[in-house]
Image (cartoon, rainbow, N blue to C red):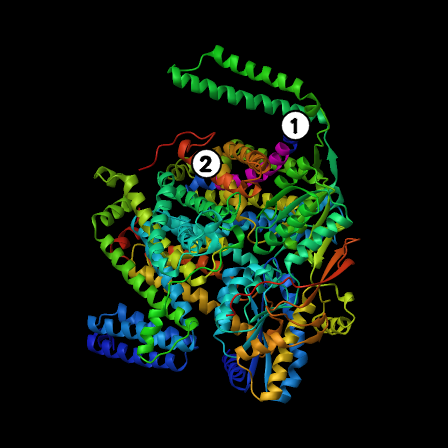
Amino acid sequence: MKKLFQNSAFLSLLIAASAVIFGYWLLENPRSTLAFLLTLGALLAAFMLDIPKWLKVLVGGAILLLVIPWAGFKNSFLFELGVQTGIYAAMALGLNVVVGLAGLLDLGYAAFFAVGAYTWAIFGSKQANQFMPWHIFPLPGAYFYLFMLVAVVMAALTGVIIGSPALRLRGDYLAIVTLGLGEMVRVLANNLDHPINITNGPQGITPIQRPPIDWFIALFDKFGIHMSRAEAYPLFFYFLVLVIIGIVTLVNIRLDRSRFGRAWIAIREDEVAARAMGIPLLPTKLLAFATGASFSGAMGALFAAKQLYVSPESFTLIQSIMILVMVILGGMGSIPGAILGAATVTILNVDLLKTASDYLNDLRNAGFVLDLGIFKYNFANLPNQLEPAKYERMVFGLIMILMMIYRPEGIIPERRHVAEMKEKE
Amino acid sequence: MKKALWLAVVALGALAFAQGKVIKIATVSPLSGEQAALGEMIKLGAQLAIEEAQPEFEKLGFKLELAPQDDQANPDVGVAVARRLVTDPEILAIVGHLNTGVAIPSSEVYKDYQLPMVSPANTGPAVTDRCYLDIDRLVGRDDVQGPAGATFAVKTLGAKRIFIIHDKTTYGQGIAEQFKKRALELGAQVVGFTGTEEKSNFQALILQMKAKRPDFVYFGGIYNQGAVLLKQMRERGIKATFMGPDGLDSSKFVEIAGQAAKGVYYTTVAGPIDQYPKAKAMAKKFEEKFGKAPESFAIYGYDSANVIIKALKNFISYAHRAPTRAELSMLIRQTTLEGVTGHVEFDYKGDRKQADYFVVHLEEAKYPGKVVKVISFPAPATKCKAIR
Amino acid sequence: MLEVLIQLLPSVLLEGLILGFVYAMIALGYTMVYGVLELINFAHSEIFMSGAVAGAETFILLKGAIANPFILLALAILIGGTVAAIVAILVERLAYRPLRKRGTTNRLVPLITAIGASFFLQDLVRLIEGLWHNAFYRRYPSFEVFEATYTLPNLLGSLIILLTLWLVFWVVAYFFYWIYRTVTRTQGISRKASRGLWIAALVLTLLSAVIYRTTIFGDLGLTIQMKSILVVVISFAMLYGLNWLVHRTKLGIAIRAVAQDAQTASLMGIDPDVIITYTFLIGGFLGGVAGVLFGLLYTLVHPYVGFIPGIKAFTAAVLGGIGNITGAAIGGLVLGMLEMLGGTYLTFLTNGAMGTEYKDILAFAILIFILLFRPQGIMGEQVGEKV
């Protein structure tokens, strides 16, 4: 039996078969959470297990580019899930550079996300007219791509500004200070509606321009698929996110193997030794900070365009913690780990916890009575407070504690990292 | 244990298959958190309306259900809930939200899927000023409520030096600014205008009040913050009259503020039950069913659900099938109802044609207070550029 | 306007003092754990919160049974402190100890665990409260005895104003002298110059006292509530007691020994694990008592109430020099007053452009400033980094 599972041919067959079966199931039942999870499971298995590369690409391409978009037409929530996963995956990859590679614990990472989001929100809406002359705002949606780059630059700049005092500090102080600075960015966003109205304060900014997609709709029209604008946007954002994730992953892999990547790891492993080897500490750390921030900034711009509404409430500490949990879950320093962590946490948070809540709600509304012989429980008496969706903090906290105690190197550990995490004094 | 499992599976199956044609109306309001007291009233009001209508729908061959959702008074959660709701084909209409700041981004989602939303509580002008076909509201607007409060404060109560505080939310800041504008127009002096996210320690604000000696304090926000602020103000000897918008309209306000609540004024768009002759019967049923008296937004939740139910009934009895969401949206806009809150009729952008605004005075530290003024006012007009 | 600001000063400092005592008590928990384990116990803000919530429950449950509010308060403090201490010990046992036993050298690992524990506890308390009452906001009942307001003599207020003015003038004069010294490149400060500075400040103070005599010696409206007095008295007693415990008892000596060098201490027959448990117990108890006093002062408590006071108390601990008990108390008082000064006066200084809403940022700004320029804090000594 064991041998059978080590047999590559058998594994390939198994994965291909499960991808086909689960994918078909998802197409038939696009609202089934189980089918969706199993499809993703097939995808993960294809990636993790030892099978030929062409099959990996085939299974991955089929699931990501065919099955999910197709099912998404019937259940657009899959797109929402996909786009959110993508946004968080890119941010997790960014934070992975800071926490995983350079070993700097950043608890204010959502601040860069906010900078990116506000960059496009302000100029892609009428908001900029409040403090700029010319009255040319909102800028047309086509500027979105340009502003994604601007957001990258802005976020990187913010990273340098926040980093240059903070990065002089030791590890645990750095964590608290970045937490404080992250909170500062949120408070500023909340309060910069006076004396000059820049962020519109708590009212938030809406509506925000989206990139034009007429060409996208026309493209699909040629294949005989007709979509309305409202239907096309989720699909468009889904593909856009896939492309961005591809780019971000590539950049990450290149960075990891570059001079900088090695310098970051050297700092993480031993600051003093790294300095002795001639690595300039502050510039190297700042570079890590700015690189991580820039990924987050790009996703912020995308978030603003997707959400159509940006307000300071989206950039709280819990966001930063959530991204940190993704990195920790996947494995600090590990690129596939960050993506897996982002997918797991997003799906857990956006879908599974809510599905469980809905299920409990249904039981409560139906007045379902659980009869265990001696123990009877009427679900109609279930308190409103008991809804898994409300306890995301508890879930995150538990993941953090358990991972640190039992598997600090994460689900998919980075090879270089394992040694350090398990080290004994 | 096994037996229980089987039972659970069977029950699940029963839930999923036994009901042929299901129509769901969802309520979305904060059911947990600091504002749960207001949010739950919306849910219970709608629940009562739906349960009353269930037998009739059974006769028509449909099962009408309530899907209560919790937005935690947070825009992100609201949007996430909205995105889940639009993908459930059985859900045909929404009763919600409580907070304007949540309703605005969430309704962008509903609009994309033409899912009708009837708001029992959002007072922010922007909710209907976007002219979406699918969004209607039953209550009045802040650009009437705020000025009405200011007029009452300056003209009737003779406020001269006004200190305005808001909670830095879309709703609180919005109404505080409306109040300030009218108060200035009427010649009162605004000695302070500040927002705060603080929930427990208001001493810094109170010290500012000591310096500026206001005779009137207006708080734009929700009771959980306002009540604590009021209590600490009174403890530090600030005797200025305290006033707020409908966010204070909850028995919890009095519960938290204690004796300090005595003498407080608030404006509200949801009048106390005794203002509506028809609501008495409903209030009795409500109390029998849920074991507590309906408060503030309960009757509005009830009427919101009833507008939807009436539109549904009209369609089904005519067409013998469930309407699509778009059809229902159009129908709701044209439906008129003699509800417990009076005559319900929507204008071209989804506002109620004639809405009531109340000024309530808490003569004793007891909820509900006494209505001292009722204003009936048509919704202000907005230019609608393009529809959808 | 200036006159009103001067008149306000005693009230501002008094409110700052009361708030400062609450911060000081929370800060002690951070500082003790840091002293012994070199770990920022992120979950301490939740230990504070669980004390506050437990105190509220005690008040609400026993309100009918016990009429005397003072006995009620004593019970609430006892139960709040105990619950918080138990939570603190449990966190240490379940989350931190396994890491210590494994001997992780990575500093991030325990810190991440601490953050996780903090978030876990917030929702755990919410779950418990939610299942119990179907609501998680708890209100502290008000008692007439505690709410009673006393007007302090104006003389006291005037004295506070004069002293503060003197201090401010002194600092300003010192600042100018420092600039002068930097420009002229003279080293050191002569005794004569230093005496000249405080005398100059005194003269300026007396001068302004004469100019603003109606303001300074007028009706200041300085009031204090019974519960504020209680908060100050109880926290002062607790702080004093802790100081005695750490410096005069065997347990205190053992704690200090472990803080200095755990390995050597264990050679002397001290079990570090036991001592660490005691540290968490004491810090947790003080945090819990602070929670009850916080609730008593500000009425409403909930599972997320701990975050902001926690961060500020940590700032206070750093401000005073982390690991130093007297430092934590002084840091708390200083931070409380700075926060109240900033929160009240910022609006006036910026003419409404920046207001109270920036007062939380102030604490962070102080934290960053201190960490960058004087990481050892007010009372701390420069400690070389262990390599």
> Observer-nearest residue: C208 or C147?
C208
As helix, strand or loop, the secondary structure at mark 1 comes to: helix
Task: Name the spot of residue B214 as percent of width and height, x first.
Answer: 70, 40
Q: CA distance from mark 2 to mark 1?
A: 41 Å
Q: Quadrant of residue C149?
A: top right
Asked whether residue C21 is drawn in magenta, I would say yes
Total numbered labels: 2
Residue linked to disc 2: C323
Q: Is residue A383 visible?
A: yes
Visible residue check, residue A374: no
Residue drawn at point x = 53 percent, y = 78 percent? B325
Horizontal side of B292 relative to C278 (left or right) equals: right
Q: In the structure shown, which secondary structural element does the residue marked by tag 2 occupy? A: loop
Q: Is residue C381 above or below residue A267?
A: above
- In the image, the segment drawn in magenta is C12-31
Q: Chain of mark 1?
A: C
Q: Amino acid at mark 2?
A: Gly
Residues flagged by tags 2 and 1 on a common chain: yes
Q: Which mark is residue C3?
A: 1
Q: Position of residue A274 (x, y in %)?
A: 24, 41
Image coords of residue B244 (percent x, y): 68, 52
Does residue C165 belong to the magenta stretch? no
Residue type marked 1: Glu
Q: Is residue B109 left or right of residue C345?
A: left
Which mark is drawn over residue A308?
none
How crowded pointer 1 is (Cα within 10 Å; few <14, some 14-19, many 20+) is rated as few
The picture quadrant where one finds residue A275 is: top left
Q: Position of residue B20 (x, y in %)?
A: 54, 87
Residue at the far top in the pictured view: C192
